[in-house]
Image: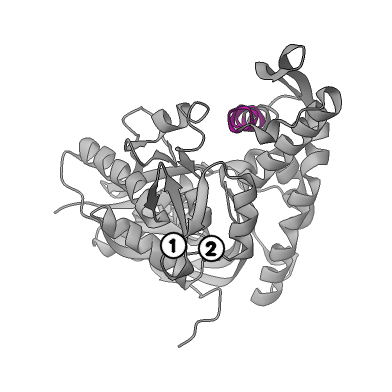
Amino acid sequence: MAKIIGIDLGTTNCAVAVMEGGSPKVIHSREGRNVIPSVVDPVTHVVGDVAKRQLVLKPKTTIFSIKRLMGRKFKDESVQYDIKWLPYTIKAGRDGMADVEVEGRTFTPQEISAMILQKIKADAEAYLGDKVTQAVITVPAYFDDSQRQATKQAGEIAGLEVLRIINEPTAAALAYGLDKKNAHTIAVYDLGGGTFDISILELGEGVYEVKSTNGDTHLGGDDFDQAIINYLADEFEKENQIDLRRDPQALQRLRESAEKAKIELSTSSEAQINQPFITQGSNGPLHLTTTLTRAKLEQIVDDLVQKTLKPVEQALKDAKIKVGDIDEIVLVGGMTRMPKIVKTVTKFFGKEPNKSVNPDEVVAVGAAVQAGVLGGEVKDVLLLDVTPLTLGI
């Protein structure tokens, strides 16, 4: 019997898992990592870590964060905002949808995502030693119908039959609750690379019931990086009267430094940013050397962190549940490693979040559990989810 894989198709990283002997296992990429960067060079068909490494050299032909454009119209406010900071060309395609243009060729977001899924499929096949034709793919809970259909199409282009599209926070709850027997209420706080979701679920006797869900499909690690980039670029401009954001290569180096510093500051109190020869001034080459402290970072991104609380309040209201009734908080997504976010969530809920799951892997693991349910490997699991947005029926 061919295995059904569970895929977390993320904005910045993807992960894939499968059920083995009754328990879910994360499949590592050929590069030996538990995640695959969602970065693609569509012309040369290079995907993942290799594509991410060439971003500085080829900022205009290497596509990242494509999930932000999935199923969206070119005229959408969010797409217009993304055009300002994404280095590659975005244009209106068929039916006014947002497409990307690389070296004169047009690609739909579905085609770009399909290239990522093809790599995931190939890596899973190499690990399993068998063909993979079916998958369960996760999407942010706040994705609308058009974005869900686009995700399904991407799977089909990659040669995968998408058996089910499930919500990321729900998948995280499935992974978290697999070994839990007692009935309790949990909040899944999912802050990833491009999206934010909050779901309130009731668990008990193998039944996972989603009480409410809320979120922001345009709030994630990308926005945090952007805030750091703007701060660094503004400081550099004050000193040297040159705006680094106007040079695609300098901007990409700045983006890498910002992401690296953000990750470093989750474990240390300051990070060194050192980019020699970042641009050319009137008197010769200029270097970017500075120190970013955790306190400064928290000040820069404070409004973004606070922005996550409004959907949380709304989700509690929709579920008709008080903050005190939440038994466990499950943190999902790499951004939840940021101490400021852990602090904010702890303060809001009045208790420490649960640390038992790996924020990078938990969604893929949950998708694999759902795949196991569909394949008959996992028994006694019932998933009751909600539609987050109104549907025209």
Q: Is residue 101 magenta?
A: no
> Which element type, helix, strand or loop, lies under badge 1?
loop
Q: Is residue 378 visible?
A: no
Q: Nearer the viewer, residue 162 or 173?
A: 162
Q: Name the residue located 80 percent from the left edge and 40 percent from the top edge.
A: 300
Most foreground residue, 373 or 85: 85
Label ID, residue 74? 2
Quarter the N terminus occupies: bottom left
Task: State the residue lying farthest toward the bottom.
Answer: 393
Is-magenta flag for residue 257? yes
CB contact under 8 Å: marks 2 and 1: yes
**Prevailing secondary structure class for the magenta stretch in the rendered image:** helix
> Residue 362 location in percent, x, y?
47, 47
Image: magenta residue range: 248-259
Give the residue pinned by disc 1. 93
Which residue is found at the position 28% from the left and 64% from the top? 374
Find residue 255 and report its image quarter.
Answer: top right
User: How far apart are the alpha carbons under marks 2 and 1?
Assistant: 8 Å
Q: Residues within 10 Å of mark 1 (few under 14, many from 20)?
A: some
